[in-house]
Image: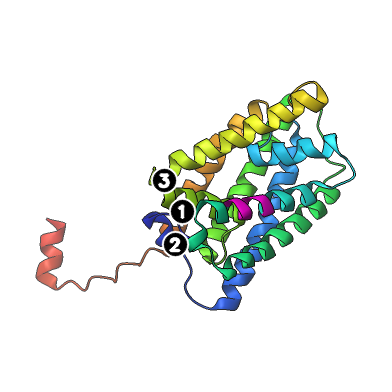
Amino acid sequence: MAHHAKEAEIVDTGNLKRRWATYIAGIYILTLGVSLAIRAGIGISPQSSLTRTMTLVYPSLTQGTYNFMLELIMLFLTYLVLPKDFKLKNFASLIPAFVLAAFLDLNLMLTKAIGFDVYYQKFLLLAFADALLALGLFMMIRANLVLMPVDMFVNTLFKRMGWKWGNIKTTFDCTLLVTSALIGLSFLGEPKFIREGTIMNAILVGQYIKLYFFLFKKINAPKQPPVDLTGAQMVETVK
């Protein structure tokens, strides 16, 4: 699941049950962060803005359902990009996608009463939401298990095109953002859920993940054994 050597440094390769527990907990924390970001009301991530906009276009389906539908589309596109590399096991990615959809709907229900009128409170809520979202992603990376179809699609484009992974991810996110804006303009008269918080999300989530990487390495760095100095060495040290 790790995309880069830096991610490989923090992945857990031990007990499988522990890794699955970490992975599922990560999904829950991620969806809690997404839900709180929505409640902040000043903009959300490109993927969330698309699925949230769809709940306004056709409210009969939940955001979790739309999110799962998007994951299905991404899995199909993954097959179209590199059909020879597509394996039956790739369908296993739909399991965590379904869990994410269920957790998202649950957390949207649990956070329904949360809302602020004062802007700085909305700002702080979004900053906290992005911290949770990043923590969830960090835990999923650490668990090193199944890629979500969306991430699998980006990775497949990376293999197929050979561009830098970061550039492909940015282009993909921008495509989702433009799609969300076009749907909003076409059906609702204006783009929805795309505001300053969308830019905040793009900046803060990456910075939070860097912070979690740093803290994890700091906490788990091997401790230097105490040095047993002789009397002569102690005198030299003092000098």
Label 2: which residue? 10
Residue 118 in view, yes or no: no
* 19 relative position to 72: left or right: left
Name the residue rendered at 56%, 42% in the picture. Answer: 205
Q: Secondary structure at mark 1?
A: helix
Residue highlighted by disc 3: 161
The amino acid on which the numbered mark 2 sits, given as a three-letter code, is: Ile
Say if residue 169 shows up in the picture. Answer: yes
Q: Nearer the viewer, residue 23 or 47?
A: 47
Disc 1 to disc 3, how far (Cα)?
A: 28 Å
Residues marked 1 and 3 touching at CB (< 8 Å)? no
Residue 90's x, y, as percent? 58, 65
Q: How many numbered circles does the render carry? A: 3
User: Counting other residues with Cα less than 10 Å from the Cα at mark 1, is it few (<14), some (14-19), or many (20 or more)?
Assistant: some
Which residue does the image show at 10% across and 61% down from the upper left? Answer: 236
Look at the picture and state if 148 lies above or below 38.
below
Of the two numbered discs 3 and 2 on the same chain, state the one appearing first in sequence. 2
Relative to 37, does residue 69 appear above or below in the rendering? below
82 falls in the magenta region: no
Q: Amino acid at mark 1?
A: Phe
| Image: 121 above or below 224 | above
Percent across and percent down for residue 173 are: 57, 38
- What residue lies at 53% left-to-right and 35% top-to-bottom? 203
At numbered mark 3, what does the secondary structure look like: helix, strand or loop? Answer: helix
Residues at marks 1 and 2 touching, judged by CB atoms closer than 8 Å = yes
The residue nearer to you, when weighing 139 against 76, is 76
